[in-house]
Image (spheres, rainbow, N blue to C red):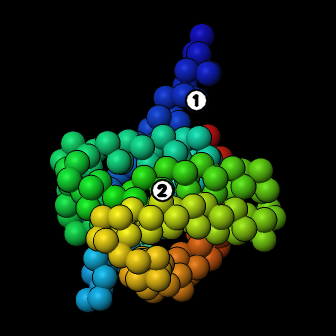
Amino acid sequence: MPNKNKKISTRQMTMIALMTAVTSILGPLAIPLPFSPVPVSFTNLAVYFSIFVLGANSATVSYLVYLLIGIVGLPVFSGFTGGFAKMAGPTGGYLVGFIFMAWIAGFFVDRFQGKRVLQASGMILGTVVAYIFGTAWLCVQSNLTFGAGLAAGVIPYIPGDLIKIMAALAVGPVLRQAVRRAA
Ligand SMILES: O=C(O)CCCC[C@@H]1SC[C@@H]2NC(=O)N[C@@H]21
């Protein structure tokens, strides 16, 4: 007799690996900006999608696997880079902050299914936490004042990140339903 729990867990592991692969494809495709060491990134978009496909806990695990893959040297970080040195670079704080973003945003998405405003609020909150990690480290690493940190690490990215959140809110629930229906 097949063990249903084990089957679900194997399936979930496959889905986690799939979303790690999606993050590893989108992560390197960053757009550099001439005035900042922080590129426009699609890693957060991949995390937003992971949250809808996997739920908070598995999305966090999927992102952690991506982070480990990058730390050991595979070129999955922005600009096809990898290695532990990236964590000490200007964008290392965002890479850490995304762990918390995945869980916080995922918690709201899971908890408030069908309530887009609350889901959006949670995604914005998680993103703010990622920005706090990212900007704090950017200021330390690049010896920037708080104002310069905001100019180089936050303000230029807000419109794009809001568009990513809206895109994930539009497509994510459809993905979640499709994944659940296929289960
Ligand atoms: O180097 C990396 O792989 C991570 C890049 C992080 C870029 C940050 S994420 C938040 C903000 N939004 C963006 O589009 N870029 C920055």
Question: Does label 2 or label 1 sit earlier along the sequence?
Answer: 1
| Depth order, front residue of 17/77 | 77
The kind of residue on which mark 2 rests is Gly
The kind of residue on which mark 1 rests is Ile
Crowd rating for badge 1 (residues with CA inside 10 Å; few <14, some 14–19, many 20+): few
Instruction: Tell me where residue 183 sits by quadrant.
Output: top right
Coordinates of residue 62 in the picture (x, y in percent): 45, 44
- The residue located at (29%, 71%) in the rendering is 142
- The residue located at (35%, 48%) in the rendering is 67
Image: 20 above or below 174: above
Coordinates of residue 10 in the picture (x, y in percent): 49, 29
Q: Which residue is mark 2?
A: 97
Asked if the beta carbon under badge 2 is closer than 8 A to the nearest atom of ligand 1, the reply is yes
Q: Secondary structure at mark 2?
A: helix
| Depth order, front residue of 16/143 | 143
Q: Which residue is mark 1?
A: 8
